[in-house]
Every structure is written in C-alpha cells, then in structure tokens.
Amino acid sequence: MPRYILKRLFAGILTLLVLVTLTFALMHAIPGGPFSAADERNVPQSVLDKIAAKYELDKPIAEQYFAYLARIASGDLGISFKQEDTTVNELVKQGFPVSARLGLVAVIVALLFGIPLGIASAVKRGKWADWASMILATIGISIPSFVLTVLLMYLFSVKLRWLPVFGLSSWKHYILPVTGLAVAPISYIARLMRSSMLEVMRQEYIVTARSKGLAESAVILKHALKNAIMPVLTYLGPLVAALLTGSFIVERIFAIPGIGRYYVSSIGDRDYSVILGMTVFFGAFIIVSNLIVDVLCALIDPRMKMEG
Amino acid sequence: MIEVKGLKKHFELRNGFFGGKTRTLKAVDGVSLSIGKGETFSLVGESGCGKTTAARTIARIYEPTEGAVIYGGADISRLGRKELLPYRKRMQMIFQDPYASLDPRMTVGEIVGEALDIHALRRGKDREDRIRELVSLVGLKSDHVGRYPHEFSGGQRQRVGIARALAVEPEFVICDEPISALDVSIQAQIINMLEELQEKFRLTYLFVSHDLSMVRHISRDVGVMYLGNLVEVAGVDELFSGMRHPYTKALLSAAPIADPRRAREASRIALSGDVPSPLDPPSGCPFRTRCAMAKGICAESKPELKAVAEGHLAACHFAG
Amino acid sequence: MIAIAIACEPKLVIADEPTTALDVTIQAQILDLLRGLKDKLETSIVLISHDLGVIASMCSRVFIMYGGRVVESGLVDEIFYEASHPYAWGLLGSIPEPGEGRRRKLVPIPGSPPDLMAPPAGCAFAARCAKAMRVCAREQPPVTRLSATHRAECWLLDPRVAKRPSAEEAGL
C-alpha cells in the first residue's frame, strides 16, 4: 500500500510538471503580455524595460521557466503582475476557504440527494417514480449551471425575495449557490447509482440473500448498496476537486469571493503568474483528491489489490 | 417429504415504453414431482428448459404462478415472508456460480453468520464456534473465516456456499448446477462432499444439472424437462436403461461417453432444429416439432405425464 | 464461427473448447460437424477440451497437460485404458464411470493446480500426487517411452524406481 501511494504521488508530480510546462508554453505563445495594455498610455520604453526587468520578463524563456519551476518546488506560486504586492499564495489563502466551504456543502448535498434518488429509482424500476426521477436527472445534467443559477436567482431572490442575491454571510446565502453547484452532480450521481444498483440487484448473491430469508429492505441496504456505491465513490474524486476549487460561474453570479473568481479575472488581465500559480494549485488538488478516493476505494473493496 | 403439484411459473414480458403489450413466457408450465427424505431427485434438460426456474420457484425465490409446493404437510407456495421464514430455514439453495452467489464484500464468517442471524440461531461465542464448525465441515481451514470470497479458488468458494446453506441445518437442499462452473478434478471433490453430507445429515437433494453422467452418479430419481414441461420421470437406472420419451432418448444418446471403445460403438439419435421459443410454444406436445415419431395427435393434444411402468412416468402419446 | 474457420479449407483446425458452453444436443451437432470436416476434407483437428467424454469420442491421439507441460501422450485407447501418469489417473477417477455398471465413489484429485507464477522445482503435480516421492519435488521427471506412441513424464516410470504401480492399484 505505501509503495502504491508513493508510486501514485510520483506519477502525480510528473503530471503536474507536464501541466506547468504546457501552461507556461501556452501563456508565452499568446501574443501580448500583462503590460502590453500600457502601450496605449504611451509609457516610455525605458519604463517598460524596467517593469520587465522587475518581473524578470526580459530573461530568456528557458531561464524564466526554470526559475519558475524552482519557485514552485519551494511552495511559492509567484507574485501577481497586476495586483501590487499580492502573492498567488495569498490569493489562494483568501479564496480557497470560501470556495471549499461552499463546495463541501454542495458535495454533501449532492450525495444526500443523489444516492437515495438513484436507489429509489432502481428499486422502483419501470414505475412512475423511476421515470420521474430519471427525467429530472436528465434535465439536471443537460441544463447548464449558469442558466439554472440565473433562473433560480431571478425566481427566489428577485421575484419572491425569499433569498439574498449575493454574498455568503448567512445560511440563507448558501441555498442558491449550493443548489446551482449541486444539481448537476445530484443528477449524475442518481443515474450512476441507479445503473450500478440495477447491475448489482441482478447478481446471484442478491438471490442468495433473499433465499436466506432476509427482508427486502435488508437485502437492498446490506448487500446491494454496499456493492453498488463503488462507482459513486470513484466519481467523488473529480467531483470534490471540481467543487472545492470553486466554480467560475456560480462564484461570479453570486459575487462570492472564492478562488474561482480570481482565476477568471486573472485570465482577463493576462496575469501570467496568477494563471500559472492557480493552475498548479488546481492540478495538485485534483491529483491529490483522486489519489485519496482511490485509496479509500481500495480500503472499502477487499477485491482491489494495491499493486503498482 | 416434498411434493410439487402442477407448478407453473410464467413471466410477463413488457415490451416498449410505459408497459405496452405484454407477452407471457411460460418458463415452467406444469411440473409435478415428489422427493422422499434423504433422497436425491435430479432435474435434467438443456438450457432454457426451465429446470433452474422450477428449482427457484420451489425455493420460493420466484413466486409461483400456479400450483402447490407441499412441504411437511403444508402448502408453502402462498405463504408470506414471515410465515415462510421457518421453511426457509429447512430449505436451502446452493448456486451454480460460487463466485457470483457470494457477496464480494463480506468475509466467509459474515456470509455464514448472516444465515444464523436471520433465523436467530446462535449468539456470541456459540455463534463463532458454529461458524468454525461449519467451515471445517466443508473442508476449509478455520483461518479462512476472515477471508473474502475472491481469495478462494472456485472449488473453495463452492464449499463456502455449501457451508452457508448448511448453517441453518436444513433438511432439503436445492443444488442448482453446483459443479458446472468447476474444473473436472474439483467437481469430484464437491460431489463427494455433497454425498458425504447427505449421508451424515440425511439431507434431501433436488439436484439441477445438465451433466448426465453426474446425474446418473448422484441421483435416485431423475426428471427430464423440455420447454417448461417434465417429459419423463423415473428411477435413475430405469431411466438410463429404459427411457421411453423420444426426447430423453435423443438427450441421453447425445451425451459423450468417456470411454473410447464404447463411444465408437454408440449410435446417436440426431435432433434437428432448435428448441422452440417458450414465448410461443407449439400446440399439443412441446417436443413434436423436433420429434421423429410425431403424428397428427401430437399437435392436437398435449400428452399427460402418465405411468408407463412401475415408478416410471412419461409424457408421450406413444410411450406406452 | 466454424464456417469462418473452414472457409478456406484449411489443413489444420484448432478448436479451443468448442463445445464447453453448449448443451449436449448442440454439442453433438458441433462434434458431428467437426467429424465431417475431418472425414471429408481430411482436415487435422487440434481439440482443446477438459471434457473426457468429448475427447473419448472425437480424438485419435491425446496429450494431457498439467502445469504447462505435456505429462502424458498417446493414442486415445492408451490414455483411457493404460494411463500411466498419476494425473491421468486423477482425471479419469474424477468422473463417474461411463455407461452402466455399479456406482463407484469418485476419486478426486486433492488440492488445486499450482501457481505458474512460482512453479515448483520438480514435477508440477507432486504436491497433489498420492504417489509422490522425494525426487518428485526436486527434479523434473524424464520422459519415458511406453510404446511407439505412448509417452509419460513421471518418476514412477523411471527404471530406477523399484516397483511400478499400475492403474488398477490407483483404484481404477
């Protein structure tokens, strides 16, 4: 097991390196730079040179690249080009807890609704409850979250005035953003759970359990659920990573000062170091959360063996 | 000890969305048999003949459409879950695929123990002792109790399945193709064990198999099924030497003989065509579409399963 | 499947467990087809099977494999009536006696096949063999020629072993 984790960590670092290199190369391939907008204001070339020198943009690209790698390795994600005296680490420290709290609530809500919905659907297969929940789930997956969020906001905040429009200062503030974030995962989990459950219910050991004289509810909870939950757990890795690192759209719509918002604005500003730094942070987070979920799955499923 | 009367199991197949037309699949269409205590009755036939469905309907895994299952004097075919529970304890099943029939996320101890818990048989240390006793009864080591099914070979898994079935001290065990997923050398281990257990606990077996040589080895009586119907029932020696139904003749002659000299001499009755669909069975005798002896009467009336000799029943107009 | 295999009238057909998943009547049809192929087109057939009944009724020569090696080979009658390797005895003892006759107790082979990732040093069958000697676990047995067509790999057949047990003694 420790060998496996080490191996995965090593692979993760390699992935990160590729990610950094690609993002770095792409950033530099795009015409224009963080200070090119300054041209319009007729800033003297000498000043531009000085700025470039300050942020080491005058050095050869290879040198910039290795200097950047060295800094990342020491845990420093760089400083912002645009916001004076702000480091990327500080942006992450400010934004991440906000995004993570919102994301965590969304993950819990998604599991709390998605799993029972999927089970109910599988147990009542072909009945109206199944049809209804699967139609809802399909709608949930296909409506883009920005459309849904704006609709919800219009209905509950603007028309009915039940819920606040933006910010995150009370539990009421959480309802709309969490709904916006959780609807798609709920739908996905419900469908995943349903198909996995149907698969498991066909298995012979379910027949065995019934022939032992076990009540149907015990058959479902004790034998079927335990075996059917695996795909949902696997999906949890990317889901947690995606929701905890903040949603660009939902955070923007509700003006939530999360990490996603910084990311979006840094792209608009061509703030290289913030884009790069955040990409590295997201990448590392996704890699680690996938690893944790895989290890969890292995601990739960006795059949999975940790072999490299 | 157990008597099955006119057992039918029909499945309603729905096609299309929201119900639509339903068609009836007559998987088991009138099966009657009786098994005495300590005896082995085998159901044989080809895949799709309904032998597994018949066994599962007797075990009340499927709800019977029609007919009665008389067990210890009571008809158990209509009992609810609660009333059925004591009969579940007396009647257990062993399944074909020893891997699929064991919950992969439970240890052997949990699998065997669950059966004890459902029927509230043993508690605490007594329960642990009983699990160990069962595990050693089927030839596994006591340290196997904490292992998961995937850590065992096919034969060992089937032993776990047997330990699970025997946990509640049943009288009647339904073995649904218990050896067909196993290697030849392992099959013999399991068959020997089933025979020893039968002797030791006076178990009654309903043995479902398509392996005619094993059926001949283990059974006292044999019932041959075709398209949901029992076409012939007789004592094992009577059946293998004096079969009356043309399907039985074809089936037995098709089984390869593991003896080169006799195999060279053997003649085979070839069957043409395929088994008709149980969704749309032929009128009259179910076998008439493939039968060389079929006459007009075979399409008109379905032959009853009737005695053709002492303890020998056949469902054929020309079997007498 | 068979049509594809014989489309270009091959000289050799390799049939890997061709009837394992089939019912006996369908199996009989497939075996008839293979027999016809052999007789009409003079095709040679390599039949891979664990079904001794199929082998007895189809084959002229038989190779018995265990742990990745051919442990015994010979004409079909030599294998079924003069088997010399304990594994062959085990296989024949595991199935009910063919045809009529009294019911004899099955003689299974104890244990399970060896792990080929870590094959044993000597004879692969030694661990499950009732007649195993010390040498069996240490060294691979040599091939013994029992007739022009019959060969087996077993230390029991080695001339240095004093008494050679027979198939009758093995309970067959």
Image (cartoon, helix red, strand yellow):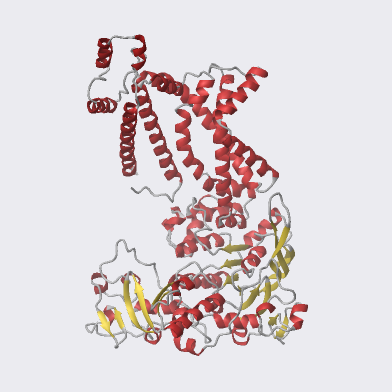
Q: Quadrant of residue A284?
A: top left
The correct choice, above or below, for A294 with respect to B16 in the image is above
In the shown orientation, is residue A214 left or right of residue C81?
right
In the shown orientation, is residue C50 left or right of residue A25?
right
The correct choice, above or below, for C60 with respect to B90 in the image is below
Residue nearest the observer in this picture, B195 or A65: A65
Q: Quadrant of residue C15?
A: bottom left
Residue under the point 55% across and 75% down: C26
What is the quadrant of the C terminus of chain C in the image? Answer: bottom left
Rendering coords of residue A119 (x, y %): 60, 43
Residue nearest the observer in this picture, C12 or A165: C12
Rendering coords of residue B126 (x, y %): 52, 54
Rendering coords of residue C117 (x, y %): 31, 61
Q: Quadrant of residue B314?
A: bottom right
Residue under the point 40% across and 41% down: A295
Residue under the point 62% across and 68% down: B48
The correct choice, above or below, for A137 with respect to B309 in the image is above
Let me know if residue A111 appears in the view. Answer: no
The correct choice, above or below, for C9 with respect to A136 in the image is below
Let me know if residue B232 appears in the view. Answer: yes
Rendering coords of residue C48 (x, y %): 41, 74
**Numbered-mark total:** 0
Residue nearest the observer in this picture, A9 or B166: A9
In the shown orientation, is residue C159 left or right of residue B167?
left
Residue nearest the observer in this picture, B91 or A277: A277
